[in-house]
Image (spheres, helix red, strand yellow):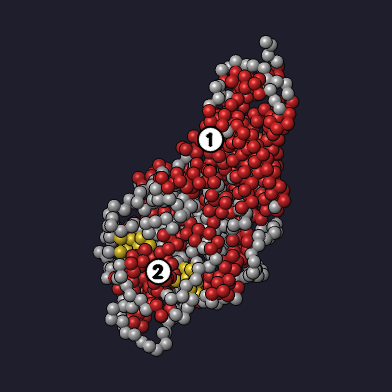
């Protein structure tokens, strides 16, 4: 079978996007990991044990605990969006693995409705960004565009899974093919193609934008540090130098 | 020294989030540091010629040294959760006092010089060059942050504006744009040993005066020892405790507690200051140098324990940083926390039934308690998380019959800064201090109305000085702020004490210009 130019282009785009995403993200994570934290600055009250920190961090990651304390509306829309995204990403695993794992099969319908959660959350966040004067003041064009981009990805996804349908068999063979460097044809479906181009764009933007909040949270000293400064001496290498003279 | 005429905000019955008023506080700037304030700290005396390049280089340097700074600069998603959390925003309604907007003053420069998006698409991501106007904004608005960390509680990523304002101040110091109040005080500590520039003989004189006062009042010879070698405890307390009201009543309280518990203690002329303004200007080196005085004093006097008096940011530096800056403390008695807060000491003694109180001595007051920001969100007391909220309240309740907390969103981890922390306790920032106190004044106003509260206790020298100054602007009186150990002092029953049934005469001290003493 002949491979279309479009398929080559989309394949190339995803290889590039995957490379930029991984390279950018790994270098950022390495930078965060390597940069010393010279002082103990957990936001108190903080856990006094490592296990406590794992618990605190889990509450932040899963429940958005701090955001819940600050703004119920932002929390609700933000959490709906992220939880929907999480379900949807799990659902999308079916395009990359074969045979599909059992639990990925189970969550398919949940993932499908996850896109609705995403949509509601994103619209809420966008409205808030435009309507609330304080949030409008702090927004740059990129902050609006990011929401619009993800909203478009979500909408095209919803359109395909609920209304238009898509040739999922071909999509799957295209992506499993990418993994083994064996390029297959992607259907020339405009909704599908725009969905894919936008996803690739998001991957490229990720390590160079505020989407770094995802790895950032795990390296935030106010959240990951243990409150034990009286018991255990904490000193950074660069600060140790002052002690030598 | 009225710099600007301004109106004191009205206390609102139902605090709602105010609408933005752009530029409302753009005129607020502290006095700049002169050469003589800058150079002892290792900073240039005036704006250096290639300031732009020096500043950018310093930013890069700080990002590589402070994980928090690097992560916070990248991670903000502009969700807006912090926008209504800063007392300076609530009090001034200037949008640049929203934590995220304050951070963005720094972040937009970071993006321009250090990120791909900011280098190639500055308009898209709100990145700007570091210009003189931006620098002016920095000077103005990074001196409208009291580094109280309230925003970091509510940020989903824990982004702490304090870290960014500390970095900004350090960058500014490095190019010769320092703030007079902080830097002048730090140079005094480097030279003399305390914020006031109070030399040893004057300190000795003051302490002897206190001994006479207490003996006259109680009939008990409570000592205020200075530079006593071989004492068990070295007390490090803010120099305001030697002079200012109500601080000094707290110092008397500590002395009575030590006396009654039979703990031998001493103050030190070399380390006669708990405050460490090195933190406010974000300078690790200056902070370390100031902290090292405590180590030197402890070694010289051969003490076994270090106890800190009532001071908020000092307790942050002590609890969270002292081990890092001036440790290891292997020469001290490891059976006690190092360092220990005076409230922990008093609380422990109360638990062990070593102190007795006549609570009725405080019956003329109905108390509430102001959690100082640095104690609440940047340190701990006791061995459990949150001990910093429980222990001071238990000490107050052991000494007083009447206590009511302010509303729950304004205390403990959600406490509002007094409005004068972070190196802003200076007359040239009076408008900011008054307006920044608004949320606390509203919360206090409500408990006064609902529960007949008459006094607010605090364990921070800055809080005490700040409230004594701003209370009158809101129709409260300056003596409504009290020290926690002042309450202890009033109620503690000393062995052998003569009990006069006459009017309980308070020990009066001349009101000093106390701001510097914080």
Return the x and y of residue B482 as percentages of the image width and height: 47, 73
Left or right of B516? Residue B214 is left
Between B453 and B19, the residue placed more toward the observer is B453
Examine the rendering and report whether any part of residue B501 can be seen: yes
Q: Chain of mark 1?
A: A
SS type, badge 1: helix
Residue B321: which numbered mark, if any?
A: none
Q: Nearer the viewer, residue A53 or A26?
A: A53
Residue A175 position, x and y percent, is 61, 22
Where residue B101 appears, as percent x and y from the top left, is 63, 51
Quarter of the picture containing the N terminus of chain A is: top right
Query: In the picture, residue B426 is in which quadrant?
Result: bottom right
CB-based contact (under 8 Å), mark 1 and mark 2: no
- Disc marking residue B395: 2
Residue at the top extreme?
A1
Residue A63 position within the rendered picture, expressed as x and y whole percent measured from the top left: 54, 46
Q: Residue at x 28, y 55 (%)?
A: B334
**Neighbours of disc 1 within 10 Å: few (<14), some (14-19), many (20+):** some
Q: Residues within 10 Å of mark 2 (few under 14, many from 20)?
A: many
Secondary structure of the residue carrying numbered label 2: helix
Q: Which residue is under mark 1? A: A28
């Amino acid at each position: 079978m002949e491979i279309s130019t479009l398929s080559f282009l989309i394949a190339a785009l995803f290889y590039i996007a995957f490379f930029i995403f991984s390279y950018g993200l790994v270098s950022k994570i390495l930078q965060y990991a390597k940069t010393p934290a010279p002082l103990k600055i957990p936001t108190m009250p903080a856990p006094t044990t490592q296990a406590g920190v794992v618990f605190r961090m889990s509450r932040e990651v899963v429940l958005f605990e701090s955001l819940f304390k600050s703004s119920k509306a932002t929390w609700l829309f933000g959490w709906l969006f992220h939880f929907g995204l999480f379900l949807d990403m799990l659902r999308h695993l079916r395009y990359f693995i074969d045979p599909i794992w059992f639990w990925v099969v189970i969550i398919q319908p949940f993932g499908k409705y996850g896109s609705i959660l995403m949509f509601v959350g994103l619209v809420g966040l966008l409205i808030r960004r435009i309507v609330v004067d304080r949030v409008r003041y702090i927004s740059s064009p990129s902050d609006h565009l990011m929401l619009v981009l993800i909203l478009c990805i979500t909408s095209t996804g919803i359109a395909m899974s609920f209304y238009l349908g898509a040739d999922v068999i071909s999509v799957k063979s295209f992506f499993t093919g990418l993994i083994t460097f064996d390029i297959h044809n992607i259907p020339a479906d405009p909704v599908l193609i725009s969905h894919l181009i936008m996803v690739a764009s998001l991957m490229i933007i990720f390590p160079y934008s505020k989407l770094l909040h995802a790895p950032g949270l795990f390296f935030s000293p106010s959240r990951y540090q243990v409150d034990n400064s009286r018991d255990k001496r904490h000193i950074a290498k660069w600060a140790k130098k002052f002690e030598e003279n | 020294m009225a710099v600007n005429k301004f109106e004191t905000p009205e206390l609102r019955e139902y605090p709602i989030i105010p609408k933005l008023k752009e530029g409302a506080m753009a005129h607020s700037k502290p006095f700049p540091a002169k050469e003589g304030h800058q150079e002892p700290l290792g900073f240039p005396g005036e704006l250096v010629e290639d300031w732009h390049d020096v500043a950018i280089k310093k930013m890069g340097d700080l990002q590589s040294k402070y994980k928090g700074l690097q992560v916070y600069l990248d991670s903000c998603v502009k969700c807006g959760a912090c926008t209504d959390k800063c007392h300076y925003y609530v009090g001034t309604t200037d949008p640049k006092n929203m934590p995220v907007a304050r951070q963005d003053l720094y972040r937009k420069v970071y993006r321009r010089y250090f990120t791909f998006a900011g280098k190639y698409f500055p308009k898209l991501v709100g990145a700007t060059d570091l210009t003189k106007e931006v620098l002016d904004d920095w000077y103005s608005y990074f001196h409208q942050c009291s580094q109280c960390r309230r925003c970091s509680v509510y940020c989903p990523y824990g982004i702490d504006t304090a870290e960014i304002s500390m970095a900004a101040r350090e960058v500014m110091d490095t190019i010769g744009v320092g703030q007079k109040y902080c830097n002048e005080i730090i140079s005094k500590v480097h030279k003399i040993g305390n914020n006031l520039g109070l030399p040893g003989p004057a300190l000795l004189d003051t302490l002897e005066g206190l001994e006479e006062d207490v003996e006259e009042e109680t009939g008990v010879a409570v000592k205020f020892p200075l530079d006593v070698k071989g004492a068990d405890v070295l007390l490090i307390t803010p120099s305001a405790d030697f002079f200012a009201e109500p601080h000094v009543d707290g110092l008397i309280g500590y002395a009575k507690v030590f006396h009654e518990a039979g703990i031998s203690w001493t103050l030190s002329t070399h380390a006669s200051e708990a405050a460490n303004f090195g933190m406010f200007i974000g300078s690790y080196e200056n902070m370390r140098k100031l902290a090292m005085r405590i180590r030197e004093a402890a070694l010289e006097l051969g003490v076994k324990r270090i106890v800190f008096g009532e001071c908020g940011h000092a307790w942050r530096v002590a609890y969270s940083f002292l081990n890092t800056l001036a440790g290891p403390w292997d020469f001290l008695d490891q059976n006690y926390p190092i360092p220990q807060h005076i409230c922990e000491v008093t609380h422990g003694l109360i638990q062990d039934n070593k102190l007795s109180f006549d609570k009725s001595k405080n019956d003329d007051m109905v108390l509430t308690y102001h959690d100082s920001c640095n104690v609440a969100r940047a340190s701990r007391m006791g061995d459990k998380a949150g001990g910093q909220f429980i222990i001071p309240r238990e000490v107050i309740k052991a000494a007083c019959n009447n206590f009511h907390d302010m509303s729950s969103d304004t205390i403990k981890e959600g406490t509002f800064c007094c409005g004068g922390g972070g190196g802003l306790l200076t007359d040239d920032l009076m408008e900011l201090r008054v307006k920044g106190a608004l949320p606390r004044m509203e919360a206090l106003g409500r408990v006064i109305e609902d529960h007949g509260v008459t006094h607010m206790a605090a364990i921070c020298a800055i809080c005490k000085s700040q409230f004594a100054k701003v209370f009158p602007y809101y129709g409260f009186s300056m003596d409504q702020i009290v020290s926690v150990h002042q309450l202890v002092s009033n109620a503690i029953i000393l062995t052998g004490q003569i009990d006069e049934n006459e009017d309980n005469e308070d020990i009066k001290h001349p009101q000093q210009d106390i701001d510097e003493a914080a």
